[in-house]
Structures are given as C-alpha cells and as structure tokens.
Image: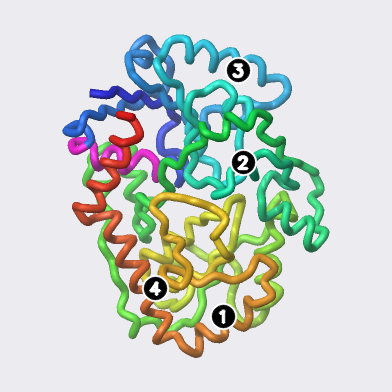
Amino acid sequence: MKYINIYSKGMISANSRGFMIPLIVNEKRLNDIGLKFKFFSEINKNIFDCDYLILDSKLFKYDWGNNKVKKTRDFFFTLKERVNKLIFLDLSDSSSTIINEALEIVDIYFKNQVHKNKNIYLKPLYGRRIFTDYYHEKFKIKDKNFEKKIPVKNKNNLKKIKILWNSYFSNYSIYGDLKMRLYKLLPLKFFLNIPRLAIDKNIKKNDVSCRMGLNYSKETVAFQRKKINEILKGSYKFKKVSRRIYFQELKKSKILISPFGYGEINLKDFEAFFYSCLLFKANMDHQETWPNFYLKDETYVDFNWNLNNFQNKLDHIIRNFEQYFEIANYANSLYNSYLHDKEYLEDFCMRLKNIFHN
C-alpha cells in the first residue's frame, strides 16, 4: 500500500473540487490497487506518516511575495526532510504558470495542463501566459500592472513537471453548486453523484451562448473576450445572468463560445460537454492535459488566436449545424464515459497506480 497525504484547504474552488471528487468517488477501487489517500487541513504529526505528501497550491497563493518567500521556502524544506517524496499540486488555470520557488524544492510538480513543448517554461512571457504574451506581441496590448513570467532557471527541473488531471470530474449541472454546499454540511458521497445527461438536438433552438465576463485586471487576459464581444456585438447577449437563466439558455443552445480566461481551460468547456453544446474555442494544440477533451474537429471546433477566422467559422457552423452536432454529441458521450463508465473510471485509477507505484 502506498500512502498519499494531501495538505489542502478543501473544495474551495472548481479546480479543487475537480481534484478531490474523483479521489473520493473512487476511494474503494484505489484502496484495492494499493493507494490510500488522506486529506489534512492542518499540519500535525500524522501528516508525515506517508510515502508522498501533496501540497495544494491554494494554501500558498499569497506566500510567494518578496516578504514571504524565505519563510515559505524554509517551510517546504522542513516538510521535505520529513517525507519520502514532496509533491506540489499547482491548481492554477494556466498551462504557463510555474512557481519556480516550489519547483526547485519539490520532487514532483503536478499541473492540470502543461505545455507540449516544455522549453516554453524556460522563456519569459508577458502576462505570465503564452496567450497573453502572444496578444502583447501581436496586438501591442499592455497591462497596467506589468508582469512578466520568471522563466524556469534549471532546465533539469522541467522533468519534474507532470500532468495530473484537469477539472472534468465535477458537477457542472444547474444543481452542482447546491450539491457541493450540501456535501460540506453532510459529507455523503450521494451529493457527489453527477447525472448522465444528453440533450436532444431538437430542443436546441438558440444558435449561440456567449455569456461571459469582460472585466479582468489584465488587458492581455481580457483581450480575446473583448475582441469576441466586438465581433458579435448586437448579435448575441454577453451580460451575465442568474444561474437558473444561464443553464436554461445553455440547454437550448447549439454552440457555446468558451474564451480563454486566466487559463486556457474554462469551466464553460465542461458545461458545453455536459449540455451537448458544440464547444467553439481558441485552438488548444499547444497544451497537453488529461483527459484530453480537446480533439480538434472531433470534440470541439477551434478558431485562431488572432480571431481572423472567428466570424466565418461561426457562420459556417450555424448554417451547417446538423453535421456539427455530431461533434457535440461525441464530446458529450466521451465526457459522460469518463464520469460514469467502468472502463474509464478504471483508467483513472490505473493512471494513479502508474504514477505513485512507479
């Protein structure tokens, strides 16, 4: 048996839920194959009784500033001395962001998504993200509070960066948030059950759902969204609405536009898969994630980062939605398989066995 202890704030965000829920749901099978996960919200003597200690990045979100770096590094070194392997779990949204101070100390650095070309981590990026750097270089977009990604200094540390899994395993239905609140009050696995849903195309009367926030502290992050708004202004509604109205609209929508936010993977992606909407999204070929739901023209349709083909592609999808619905339908089927089908749940468990037993 391998014992893996996790120091975490708990399910405080969508990414945190996506990390924790599959471990809880698959607990029995994971135990059967020799993996025992245990969660800790504070440091005590029992937390060191393990083969691996995982540190949730959410606990250290504000601890890498100039006045706290030394204290945090010392804390990490202290932990490392007391465990066999120290792991950092980076639950940030972007494939580009790496906390160098943590990378230098830990044995393994897990992310939800990573660059296929890891040499990108050796480069400084404007806005700390590959797409913000692109918009700065291509369109001269500048952030008020300039921030450049500090590149990884030691190339040998790139091998520490590994893919865990993305935030697919969570309840993205209209009742998802309510069930999570109930689970916090009464932690029964029943509340973690995710419905299996497939929407008939005949009820999809609305062409496009593009509800999205446009205000970000970084102009380079907001640029893609504002550009989409500029292209489609007057054609569709962008303003945010209540959760009930949003999901009612989504259920009836043929296409869901999911722009980049602080990261490339957006929770809207999983909402699209769940509600059988065609996911229309900027190209994702630069990154690697698991499960890989980003199969171009198989599970989603892409547009260029500069949006020069955005309008034409969208118009073509709307005119020919009958053929494009097959993409949405396959994405929904694949997504449901990873959530519910025995062979896919087994794949998740064996993936963890390969990671922690090797």
Residue at 37% over, 16% down: 47
Proximity of marks 4 and 3: CB atoms separated by less than 8 Å: no
Distance (Cα) linking label 1 and label 4? 14 Å
Distance (Cα) linking label 4 and label 3? 46 Å
Marked residue nearer the N-terminal end (3 or 1): 3
Image position, residue 106 (x, y; %): 52, 23
Marked residue nearer the N-terminal end (2 or 3): 3
Image position, residue 159 (x, y; %): 52, 34
Residue at 70% over, 66% down: 226
Distance (Cα) linking label 2 and label 1? 31 Å
Please tell me how crowded label 4 is: few (under 14), some (14-19), or many (20+) other residues with Cα within 10 Å.
many
State the extent of the magenta-drawn residues as a range: 18-29
State the residue position of label 4: 328
- Can residue 185 be seen here? The reply is no
Proximity of marks 1 and 4: CB atoms separated by less than 8 Å: no
Say which quarter of the image contains residue 349. Answer: top left
Say which quarter of the image contains residue 224. Answer: bottom right
State the residue position of label 1: 314
Q: Secondary structure at mark 2?
A: loop
State the residue position of label 3: 73
Q: Secondary structure at mark 4?
A: helix
Magenta stretch holds residue 23: yes
Q: For this rendering, which residue is in front, 336 or 352?
A: 352
- Label placed on residue 188: none
Proximity of marks 2 and 4: CB atoms separated by less than 8 Å: no
Image position, residue 333 (x, y; %): 30, 67
- Label placed on residue 97: 2
Proximity of marks 2 and 3: CB atoms separated by less than 8 Å: no
Q: How many marks?
A: 4
Image position, residue 125 (x, y; %): 72, 45
Distance (Cα) linking label 2 and label 3? 18 Å
Magenta stretch holds residue 168: no
